[in-house]
Amino acid sequence: MAKKEPIWLKVIRILLGCLFIFSSFTKAIDPVGFGVTMNDYFVSFHMGFLHPLALFAAVVAIMCEFVLGCMLLFRVKVQWAAWGYLLFMTFFFFLTMWLAIAEQLELKGIHYFGVVKDCGCFGDVIEMSNMQTFLKNVVIIIPTLIFFFNRKKVKDCRLTELGQWLCVAIFAAISVGFQLYVIRHLPFIGKSDWNKGKDVSVFVAQPAQKEVVFVYKNNASGEEVKLTQDELMAQDDAFYENNEYVDREDKVVKEAVKAKIDGFNMLDENGADHAPDYFAKDREGEVYILYVHNLSEAKEKGMQKALTLAKACQDKGVDFVGITNSSEEDIAAFVEEYGIEFPIYYNPINPITGPFMVRDAIRSNPGIILLDKGVVKEKWAWRDFPEGM
């Protein structure tokens, strides 16, 4: 008769399984975002040539984590799961140890490595520094080793060999299927600053609004009167005969507002920033903003749908504009290729430190965000673009 699994070992197994399932879920709700993190790792380790594989690598990593968690939780191929968990944790233990050390060296000014600041272990749900991540892995590696060296005390579930491998395949299919749905559409949960209902006007600096006031003095009484430009234009000739111009003053009607994060601009070819116009809280009318992080990677079907919606907006007098991180030369070529009639603005970024607001605003290339008075009213991945208004 097979020995029963010790309670203490069962607790470790269940906790480790649930941890991996939870960790995979926090990333699966936004696999594109984790793909961005993977790409940041590639750049940090001077492997930028792997950029095309970033999203694929993210999906596979999330799938493996989910499958291993389920295998442990449901006692499916336990020996395989124990080895997979050990290899997974060992790799990330040493990776995060290096990141923690490198980050400290950067902070002390000893050497700059360009390390990724957030490992993305729990997606955007739980943000952790490299040191916090390493300490977390120090804690997790202990029960991982305990379980690995006691793995033979845990028996597989009562399924045939084929049945267990079929379970593994089902676990993988669930993870990949879920991720593909999110990739094709948009994350439906998360804490993005660009979620529906969020006030994104805070990301755009608003210049102070000034009003010119003209000062005139009455010729008879010497009394001064102050008039705005509109009020002055409404005066008749008698006013100018009886009053003498003295001075003009600039009156601040609305104080300047500093952006929550510097770096979100919508620059035209002359360098003028149009972001304050479209993101203003007191703006009249909605505006559709087409986000195309990288013009060369924009889906053609998505752009065709965007052009249809832009035409509908134009017919109804609703603003439709675009924004991209691609260069002005790329914008000019893109406009010519698609025959675009709406303006596409340029948002400059630092490729290492960001901020990557165009990329992070919407997990689709292209994607559209509908703004109303600086608040996200709706957002769509290109597959879900509305055909009209």
Image: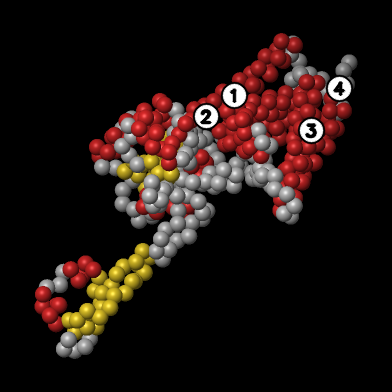
Counting labels gives 4
Q: Earlier in the sequence, mark 4 or mark 3?
A: 3
Residue at 14% across, 82% down:
242
Q: Where residue 139 appears, x then y in whole percent?
A: 79, 41
Q: Answer yes or no: do the residues labelled 2 and 3 have beta carbons within 8 Å?
A: no
Q: Is residue 44 left or right of residue 81?
A: left
Q: Quadrant of residue 170?
A: top right
Q: Which mark is residue 176?
A: 1
Image depth: mark 4 or mark 3 in front: 3
Residue at 33% across, 34% down:
340
Residue at 86% across, 23% down:
153
Q: Earlier in the sequence, mark 4 or mark 2?
A: 4
Identify which amino acid the numbered label 2 is placed on.
Ile
Q: Earlier in the sequence, mark 4 or mark 1?
A: 4
Q: Earlier in the sequence, mark 2 or mark 3?
A: 3
Using the numbered discs, state the Cα–Cα distance from disc 1 to disc 2 in whole angstroms: 10 Å
Q: Where residue 182 appears, x then y in whole percent?
A: 52, 30
Q: Where residue 369 appears, x then y in whole percent?
A: 41, 40
Q: Which residue is mark 3?
A: 90
Decide: is 252 above or below 64: below
Q: Which residue is mark 2?
A: 183
Q: Which residue is mark 4?
A: 152
Specify whether residue 270 is in view. Answer: yes
